[in-house]
Image: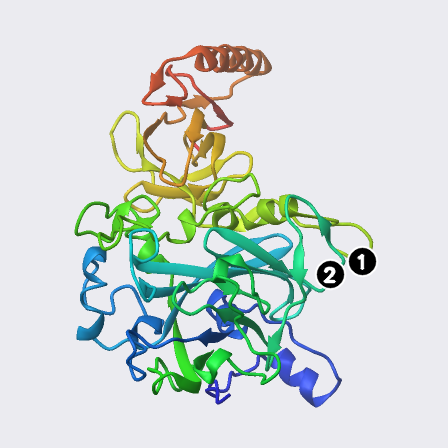
Amino acid sequence: MRRSLAPARRLPWYGAVCIALIPCSVARAATPLELAEHWAPAVYHDMDYQDGNESDYRPELITRFDFDGNWQGNDNWERLYDYPQPAYLYWAYSRSSTHWFLTYMIFHPRDWWEYCFIGDCHENDSEGVTLWIRRDGTDFGALELMQTQAHGEWFQYSDLPLQDGTDNIDGPILWDSGHPRILVQSKGHGVWGHNYCGYLTYFECLWNDDSNDFPGGDGAVYRFDAARGAEVPDGGYDKDVSYELIPLTELWERRFDIGDGHTFGKFGNFDGDTYGEDSASAPWGWSAGADGQLSGSVFFDPALAASMQLSGWGTGSIGEMSLLYEDNIYGGEVYGVVRDSLTGAPVAGAALTLEGRGSAGYAASDGSFSLFTLPGSYALQVRAALYAPAVVQGIEIATLATRVPLEIALVAVPEVPLRSAAHLMLVVVAFSMAARRSARGRRQGTVRGASGNLAALVLTESGGRR
């Protein structure tokens, strides 16, 4: 596979010392995009021609949702032959303290069959694969687990001795020049990591083991190649096609663009009206199958999903699976603005933390903030210099579609000079009483914060505020 050569990076002085004097290494954290490129899967896509025309493979070609130049979902079936279909895969990234998580979504404008009836075919099609990569101290980590999505069911692949949980291992990870190898079904486009021949493909195999080729010989092999970019297969027998990567945020940012003629017909499902309505799901709508989890859970909470599906994490030679995320933008949203309670001015730089398995961030220069988190119950801590801390209790994120708007008013800390030990005792008593009143105090929106003039005190010798 031909790959682009990255431009040379200038090493810091200590890197030059390592090279010149002693055999040492300089650790460098890979960016999310570099991780996505490094682990981008090799896609072995079985293909069938359309309606007896042996040169027509258009319904089998992978591409991007807006291949036709618009973000309307319910015209993709009809416009299939009007626009080219260069190859793209969408990618998403999140991170825990032990793992990187990468999801790749494969999109087709049609899920089709030779004879289409409602339920057999539908407009738009989205399947994919998620990777669990151990953060082992190397630049790109070690791939420990791969799960593929096919028609609402998940299939697990690993070389670790993991035991059954709500699911089980379906086989080892297959490789193609250092990249995980996946197989894609013709017509229905389900994704597997092994040669599946079961009921989901009407007992047709994805691969011919005897000839080491696709059944019938027709198929395409897609590999990521930054230098070559997005290519279109040369017919149905092209074993060397390059694809590009697109951040899934392009679709995530449109997740509330819902309605007929929009991107989505309902939350998590692409808008479609040919042979059924809104039948294809984005990753946050992918079914959890029989694993007893919410739809989309493998995507928005891969750590918890894997810990439930498979057991043995943290035992023997298998490392822990942390459930605490350091970076995960895919979830319900808590958003709003932080202002001064008296002047209404924005409080830039206010620190906001969702307790529990939440997230943290800072208010922008205009006081606005946006935090994404997983479904659950939360309390929001808000702190800023020169202001009394505030707490938002009872934030409920029911689903990925939940959005909680907040307007938080922080009370400025009054100037209280410290003159004597007796004065210190009075200040402590006053502060204690104010804190108790705040705990019982009024709500502003859903914020339980300070409600009096003496919410918190800063003690200084000169009386100045710090």
Query: Looking at the image, which residue is at 63% across and 80% down?
Result: 15
As drawn, the label of residue 160 is 2
Residue with the mark numbered 1: 317
Residue 463 in view of the camera: no
Question: What is the secondary structure assignment of the residue under circle 1?
Answer: loop
Q: Is residue 234 above or below residue 399?
A: below
Q: Foreground residue, 311 or 236?
A: 236
Q: Which circle's residue, 2 or 1, is located before the other in the chain? A: 2
Query: Disc 2, disc 1: CB below 8 Å?
Result: yes
Q: Foreground residue, 450 or 92?
A: 92
Q: Is residue 354 above or below residue 82?
A: above
Q: For the residues carrying marks 2 and 1, which lies nearer the camera in this image?
A: 2
As drawn, the label of residue 293 is none
Tell me: 125 left or right of 143: left
Q: Residues within 10 Å of mark 1 (few under 14, many from 20)?
A: few
* Measured Cα–Cα span from mark 2 to mark 1: 9 Å
Image location (x, y in percent) of residue 39:
54, 71
Image location (x, y in percent) of residue 419:
52, 18
